[in-house]
Amino acid sequence: MITKPFACVLLGMAGFAASALAQAAPSSCVRLDGGWIRFPAMAHMAGGFGRIDNTCKTDVAVTAVRSPAFKDVSVHETTLVDGVSRMRAIERLPLAAGKGVELKPGGLHLMLMDGSGPLQEGQRVPVSLVLSDGTEVHGELVVRRP
């Protein structure tokens, strides 16, 4: 026989587990595809490219990027202002539900700073995209020629 207090605890635990699964769900529907770093790359600075797709039913945003291979990773955007190419950091990269963004040379890209050592062609560099809901999406960038 299950007592009423015990049943409440079980229901509460089930609700907590369902909530945790719902919060973790976006990481399974946001992906970094075709990630790459231009070779040759300098150890102190490189650009990361690829495509980030959001197949979730809700909008999310990339709020941070991390990699164990670099001390600092951020999203940057290159724009042309009065004939001069300028780069600026993007604090929040919105990803609309069912949409994606292209990270490419001359546009949105990952700025990889202060690498732990020289990059070799074919090397795989792990990255984590931190989303606005706190979940992390793990992917990789392959060092290759454009």
Image: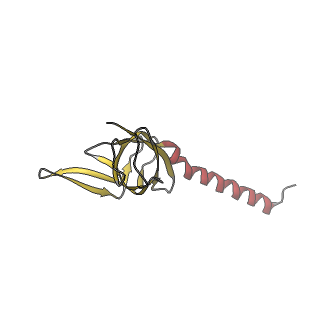
Name the image quarter holding the N terminus.
Answer: bottom right
- x and y percentages locating residue 51 in the rendered image: 38, 40
At 83% across and 60% down in the image, what residue appears? 3
Residue drawn 69% across the image and 58% down it: 12
User: How many badges with numbers are in the image?
Assistant: 0
Look at the image and name its color scheme.
secondary structure
> Residue 58: x, y in percent?
45, 47
Q: Is residue 132 above or below residue 125?
A: below
The answer to whether residue 5 is left or right of residue 141 is: right
Q: Nearer the viewer, residue 139 or 44?
A: 44
Q: Position of residue 41 (x, y in %)?
A: 34, 46
Q: Which residue is farthest left?
A: 82
> In percent of the image, x 63 and y 51: which residue is there?
18
In the image shown, does 136 or 14 lie closer to the viewer? 136
85 or 46: nearer the eye? 46
Q: In the image as oriented, which residue stretches furthest toward the right? A: 1
List x then y, in percent, for residue 138: 50, 47
Of residue 36 and residue 3, the one placed in the foreground of this image is 36
At 35% from the left edge and 59% from the top edge, which residue is drawn? 91
Residue 135 left/right relative to 80? right
Assign the C terminus to one quadrant of the image: top left
